Image: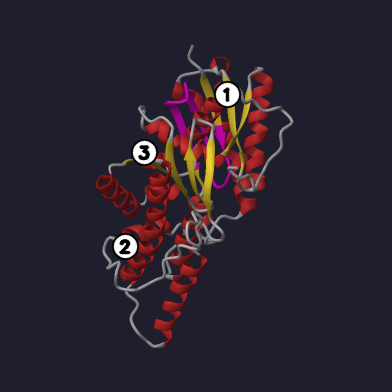
Amino acid sequence: MDLLTLAIETSCDETSVAVIKNGREVLSNIISSQIDTHKRFGGVVPEIASRKHIESINNIIQESLDKADLEFKDIDLVGVTRGPGLVGALLVGISSAKALAYGLNKPLIGVNHIEGHICANYLTHEDLEPPFTCLIVSGGHSYLIHANGYIDYELMGRTRDDAAGEAFDKVARALGIAYPGGPVIDKLSQKGNPQAIDFPRVFLEEGSYDFSFSGLKTAVLNYINGQKQKGKEIVVEDVAASFQAAVLDVLVDKTFRLAKEKGSKKIVIAGGVAANKGLRSMMERRGQDEGIKIFYPSKVLCTDNAAMIGSAAYYNYINGKESELGFTVEPNLSLE
């Protein structure tokens, strides 16, 4: 029997509602972005994000149902992001989901946002099944995991300081690039020389799968300040390319090392940075050399969206997980 999941995602600055069929088919995925609102501040302002979610959530829910050509009575399951994310933003989505589940008398599933990013790949690749090695990289998170099953994750590595996407945005800001800077860094790097500046590759202690990008970020800032003090030209494209290469070398190396350790022939990339052309290209080249198939979501499913939450909710539900109506927001929720 088909299961239709209505899913809500409000962890940061996108208000999104989707309807997903059997965890794999997207019937609708409406995303209302707040980027233009927060751009003037150079980053997301939590209070403003929460207010914007409140203003738009009801309309987005209805729009998603209309797009799927469904009514509330057709929904079998309600899924929602419970964390990690901004407290106020998460509360808007959770409150709406609880009201719907209670009013419709349907099961409610609170979803880990990071798990949602992984499941975005199931919506793009209908033949993808666990086990696989997965790299999750976004503005707030960097994880390296091995998926033994649809809801069975083995956490192998995580960021110790700045997430990869966070480092991209901070370096972009130092270069005078407006928020969000990550995609612009990626674009500029295509025109620059990745070997122009020898930025450090931080691999940490031997055998570690953790990440650390704070030192790299500092090295880039020191380089920029040093060039300015000496009155020398800063070739933005070269800085972007050299910085991106330093990040990607570490991400790719550790991911393939874990895949080799686990005997995995599939690597999945997820999160906002999974849209990075440089990362995709480097992963695919290495995958061809080592006989490992690379999977990543379509670009619209890389950033925050409710479709991925709907897929994760479905797999949690069919594996016996259901949330009580009284569950609370978990802004620092980990994948563990």
Q: Is the Cβ of the residue at disc 2 closer than 8 Å to that at disc 1?
A: no
- Residue under label 2, please give it: 189
The answer to whether residue 322 of the structure is visible from this angle is: yes
Task: Identify the amino acid type marked 2.
Answer: Ser
Q: Position of residue 51 (x, y in %)?
A: 63, 46
Tag 1 residue:
317
Is disc 3 surrounded by few (<14), some (14 to 19) or many (20+) residues within 10 Å? many
From mark 3 to mark 1, how far is it between C-alphas? Answer: 25 Å
Residue marked by disc 3: 266
Q: Per the image, is 306 magenta?
A: no
Q: Secondary structure at mark 1?
A: helix
Instruction: State how far apart marks 2 and 1 are (Cα).
Output: 42 Å
State whether residue 313 is above or below residue 171. Answer: above
Residue drawn at 71 percent across, 33 percent down: 327
Give the mark, 2 or 1, whose residue is nearer the N terminus.
2
Whether residue 15 is visible, yes or no, is no
Q: Which secondary structure lies at badge 3?
A: strand
